Structures are given as structure tokens and as C-alpha cells.
Image (cartoon, rainbow, N blue to C red):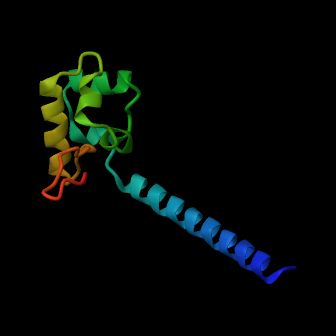
Amino acid sequence: MDVELKRLILAKRKAEWRLLRINELIADWMDRLPHLSYFQFSARTFNALCSAGITETHQLIIKTPPELLSIRCFGKRCLEEVENGLREKNLSLFETNKKKDEDGERR
């Protein structure tokens, strides 16, 4: 085999191993998150989240506030309840920051 081909195969195997390790770390991190029922959300908030298919904390924290507000029966009070509950566990919803910084570049 060509030396370059061997080097590429080795690089591919290392990348695959790193990806497996990253997946293991993510799975471990998700297992450490509290269950959604831990937050003791009101019935309205909990039912709205469940009706949208959000039953685990990791599914909730990847949502943005506008995404949650688009859920049927999920309003500003529900959003405040979720944000406050997550804040107590040092978690937050996903934020997209589209504001421009001083250099004019997006963050």
C-alpha cells in the first residue's frame, strides 16, 4: 500500500474513535441530567411539553424560547416557569445570538 493511503486510513480510524468517544461523553452527560419531572412544572406546562414530544431534559434545553412559544398552549408564563426551573439547576434554553458585536461580526 501507498504510504499516503496508510496515513489516510489511520487518520480515518482515529477520527472514528474520537467520534465514538464524543458520543459516549454526550450519552453520559445526558444521563446525568435530571428527569423533566424533577422540575415540578405546572400541569399546563408539563402537558404542553409532552404534547410536543419533549419528555426529557436534554430535549428541552436544545429548544429556543421562540420554538417553545410556538407550542400549542405554551405561553409566556410557561416559558418563564421553564426558564426559572432550568436556572435553578444551572441550565438554560438554547440561545441564538444574532446581535452583532462591536466589530460587526456575528457571534
Answer above or below: position of 35 versus 76: below
Answer above or below: position of 8 versus 32: below
Image quadrant where residue 11 sits: bottom right
Image quadrant where residue 13 sits: bottom right
Q: Residue at x 20, y 52 (%)?
A: 89
Q: Residue at x 40, y 58 (%)?
A: 29
Image quadrant where residue 5 sits: bottom right
Task: Give the residue at the far top of this rendering.
Answer: 73
Q: Residue at x 61, y 68 (%)?
A: 15
Q: Position of residue 80 (x, y in %)?
A: 13, 33
Q: Residue at x 18, y 21 (%)?
A: 75
Q: As drawn, is 88 to the left or to the right of 56?
A: left
Please state which of residues 101 and 66 is positioned toward the viewer in this rendering.
Answer: 101
Task: Give the residue at the far bottom of this rendering.
Answer: 3
Considering the image in quadrants, where does the N terminus appear? bottom right
Q: Position of residue 96 (x, y in %)?
A: 26, 44
Q: Position of residue 59 (x, y in %)?
A: 38, 39
Please state which of residues 50 and 20 is positioned toward the viewer in this rendering.
Answer: 20
Q: Position of residue 86 (x, y in %)?
A: 20, 45
Considering the image in quadrants, where does the C terminus appear? bottom left
Q: As drawn, is 99 to the left or to the right of 38?
A: left
How many numbered marks, from 0 up? 0
Task: Give the residue at the far front of this rendering.
Answer: 104
